[in-house]
Image (cartoon, coloured by chain):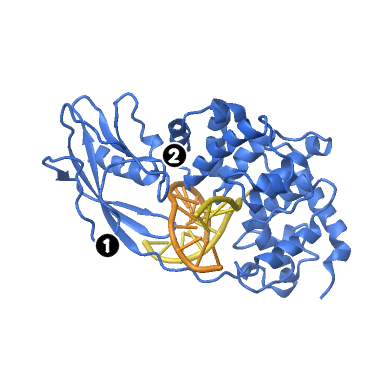
Chain colours: A blue, B orange, C yellow
Amino acid sequence: MRDLKIDSAAMSNDLLAWYDVHAREMPWRVGPADSAAGIRPDPYRVWLSEVMLQQTTVAAVRGYFLRFISRWPTVLDLAAAEDADVMNEWAGLGYYARARNLLKCARTIAADHGGNFPDSYERLLNLPGIGPYTAAAIASIAFDRPETVLDGNVERVMARLHDIHAPLPDVKPVLKERAAELTPALRPGDYAQAVMDLGATICTPRRPACGICPWRDPCAARAAGTAAELPKKAPKKPKPIRHGIVYLAEAANGTWLLERRPDKGLLGGMLGWPGSEWNGAPVPAPPFEADWRELDGEVRHTFTHFHLILRVMTAQLPNGFSQKADQELVTHRDFSPASLPTVMRKAFDLYKGR
DNA sequence: CATCCGTGGTT
DNA sequence: TAACCAAGGAT
């Protein structure tokens, strides 16, 4: 097996040359020309975008990022925000622990770091919501430090470049080593984004465009004809089907009864409809006694580790209803389906379209 | 360390 | 349509 170390400088140069021409435009990104001239992006924007991009596509993030930046232009603005405002703005993006940790992190930056992000991998790693990937991404992209990012793109590119057939996630440390060998001392931030752009646009999961890849010559999987089947992954567990019942109660004046879910667990910290537990055989749990009517149809939604089928009940919210601790009466004026997690919005859509 | 944690687009 | 996939982190 040839030693890629010998060619690593040439390879990173080839990739950067490709990136100089093909870098994708993103609202949080400083283009390669400006970056090469020494202009760094705002660390706040890099951090915000990287957290939003965790397990999430660029297309889905773009609008959320622009709305957050518009509403909270600096990390100090975000640190001073109300919890509910941030959670409402995050609604629909998923993985809601990210939003809770985002606020924790912003407040830590404000209280302990004078409003400035630390510029080293180690100190970034200590902040809530920042793991190995995000710490390396911020250190390299915002501060141009030669840290190695390892995300799904980089894993795929390295597995193919070296024709590694051992399955993820066990092989991850090996891929990290291979990636580190290629990380250049010059323009490491651009390099990090270049590898990820390469994975997103050319070295794609299916049907990689090997013919136009800047690394087509050194790629071992291309030579072996195995690129499309890499990286190998451990088989996934089947998703069970769970059932639940939600209760939509609207008062005559248009006020809705909602519940703020506990911070931990599924949809933690988000607003939702009162309802049963979600399991094999849900026990009805109406929030008040009434003549509940079941809507035709059902809500189907798939979470990370289970499928959910919801029955939707409706009744009129009585005048003078006194809510419990975690319940909220949201007036017609304040009610916005967009501030609900998607499964809850689906239940509302079923009601609206009845 | 295995499990938990969303969502929308693509194939 | 069911499965796969995406700029992962916390516990």
Q: Earlier in the sequence, mark 1 or mark 2?
A: 2
The spot of residue A166 in percent (x, y) is 64, 74
Letter of the chain that mark 2 sits on in the rendering: A
Label 2 sits on residue: A91
Which residue extends farthest front? A112
Name the element at disc 2.
loop
The answer to whether residue A242 is left or right of residue A213 is left
Q: Residue at x 44, y 42 (%)?
A: A92
CA separation, marks 1 and 2?
27 Å
Quarter holding residue A339 = top left
Report crowding for label 2: few under 14, some 14 to 19, many 20 or more residues within 10 A (C-alpha). Answer: many
Residue A58 seen in the figure? no
Judge depth for marks 1 and 2 and give the one in front: 1
- Say which quadrant the C terminus of chain A sits in: top left
Q: Amino acid at mark 1?
A: Gly
The answer to whether residue A318 is left or right of residue B3 is left
Residue A266 higher or lower than A321, as above or below: below
Which is more toward the observer, A258 or A228?
Answer: A258
Residue A277 seen in the figure? yes
Residue A145's disc number: none
The spot of residue A274 in percent (x, y) is 27, 43
Q: Residue at x 71, y 67 (%)?
A: A174
The spot of residue A18 in percent (x, y) is 78, 50
Q: Residue at x 84, y 73 (%)?
A: A2
Label 1 sits on residue: A280
Given contact means CB atoms under 8 Å apart, are the residues at marks 1 and 2 in contact? no
Residue A174 higher or lower than A118, as above or below: below
Q: Looking at the picture, do discs 1 and 2 lie on one chain? A: yes
